[in-house]
Image (tube, helix red, strand yellow):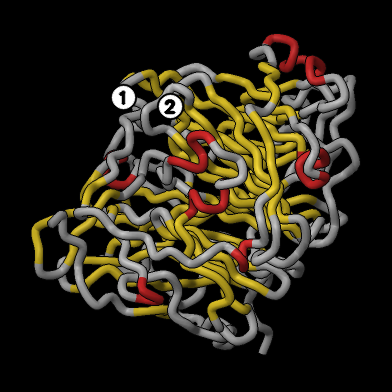
Amino acid sequence: MRRLSALLVVSFAWCAGSALAQNGPKPEVTPEVNHAVSPPLRNIPRSVHEPGPPHLIPLGKLRPNLPPPGQVDPVIQSSASASLPVTSGLNFAGVGNGDYGFTPDAAPPDTNLSVGATQVVQWVNESFAVFNKSTGVLEAGPTPANLLWTSLGGPCATNNDGDPIAQYDKAANRWVLSQFSVTGGPPFLQCVAVSQGPDATGAYNLYAFSEPNFNDYPKMGIWTDGYYETFNMFQGNLFVGARVCAFDRTSMMAGSAATQVCFQLSSSFDSVLPSDLDGSTLPPVGSPNFLLNFGLNSLNFWQFHADFATPSNSTLSGPVNIPVAAFSPACNGGVCIPQSGTRELLDSLGDRLMYRLAYRNFGGHEAMVVNHSVAAGNSVGVRWYEVRNPAILTLAQSSTTNPPVVFQQGTFAPDSSYRWMGSIAMDQVGDIALGYSVSSSQMHPAIRYTGRVPTDTAGTMEAENTVIAGGGSQLKN
């Protein structure tokens, strides 16, 4: 029985420059604030984070005009009977409440995890830890994240503001860790650490990059020419639009001075995801990074080419509108997820695509998978997409000549429970895995997963399995 792996995918043809790029925003090119080198992470004294009083971390309000509620979803999958061909792997406690002396103090906990060749790095709230991938043994941490940036100094070393990303650069066997520093801002910084080798407990090249406003909700994609990170930008409580940036990957791996190239979008666009490379087959030479968010029954698609040799030549083309099946965002983009034993409801995050936007090059075609939470009758389900376009666009072609297409899509909602906050991935043979949270007034929030193989009917998933049943419901106090 083949094991269904949990890798994500994205696909697109590339455009080294398009007519759309000429009318788009202009690149903003800024050098790093500073850079430094950390001591080996294994040598940083373990200092257990002292949690403060429990507190909520609110998300800023984004678009006032989401797709309308009440639309009929034509791709709902209301049942799933086939048995998913999976085998269980190693299961061990991560950085949770009471594990390894760690106690989270914020909701949401901003949980984030990445798997490397031999290790797993998990980041929860303001602390992260390194585990052995084969045994589950704790190798380092939990470490308060700001301690990693001590050598860098400044707000990155002083503040421990969270909103973290743990990534693994598979092509270079490097770890990439990132969190923002916004307390007392300006300055508003993005703090980025790139390991000097494949060992997550070794030394890191440290960087601080300055952003012009509060750089909320960062999401990172690893690409061949850069580390691409996106933000929702706020001036006070006013949302001013998505910002997409690329950091100079080559310089950061070498530990030398690095530049960022950014484009600021209008307030009509938010929560843009950068594509994140999976697999050993790289994108075509010169391929830009691909970005998505959703609109009215559609996906918006951009191509970002960062030129670090001549940064002013960098381009952002798009958006190209990709039609999808009709949907209404879960909870109209807000709070409506019920839990057992309480009237307190959970945030659906239905106003945005869920991280990651994973890319894979299959040789004959490129593909991406991504998901978000949508209304499913009187409940909530996970809408997922596989996007393909095997054509390669040339300099003479506009990205509208042969735009990406939705190869398959579906809304997984096999019963009346609420499924939301999914994470989707694709392996090298085209198997897809989809994990998500599930809750209802009759059950505590839990984690389940489903998946499919290429021979399954297009747009469908197989029967779900449980990773862990919830032991309680989330309360504000």
Most foreground residue, 397 or 156: 156
Quarter of the figure that contains the C terminus? bottom left
Most foreground residue, 14 or 139: 139
User: Local crowd at mark 2 within 10 Å, few (<14), some, or many (≥20)?
Assistant: many
Q: Earlier in the sequence, mark 1 or mark 2?
A: 1
User: Local crowd at mark 1 within 10 Å, few (<14), some, or many (≥20)?
Assistant: few
In the picture, the disc for residue 64 is 1
Helix, strand or loop status at disc 1: loop
Quarter of the figure that contains the N terminus? bottom right
Helix, strand or loop status at disc 2: strand
Would you identify the image quadrant in which residue 260 lies? top right
In the picture, the disc for residue 162 is none
284 left or right, relative to 124: right
The type of residue carrying mark 2 is: Phe
Q: Is residue 35 above or below residue 459?
A: above
- Label 2 sits on residue: 214
133 left or right, relative to 92: right
Most foreground residue, 105 or 154: 154
Would you identify the image quadrant in which residue 428 lies? bottom right
Would you identify the image quadrant in which residue 315 lies? top right
Question: What is the x, y in percent for residue 330?
Answer: 32, 47
Question: What is the x, y in percent for residue 160?
Answer: 42, 46
Camera sees residue 22 = yes
Please tell me which residue is depicted at 31% across the width and 53% down the height of the picture: 108
The type of residue carrying mark 1 is: Pro
Question: What is the x, y in percent for residue 398?
Answer: 79, 21
268 left or right, relative to 389: left
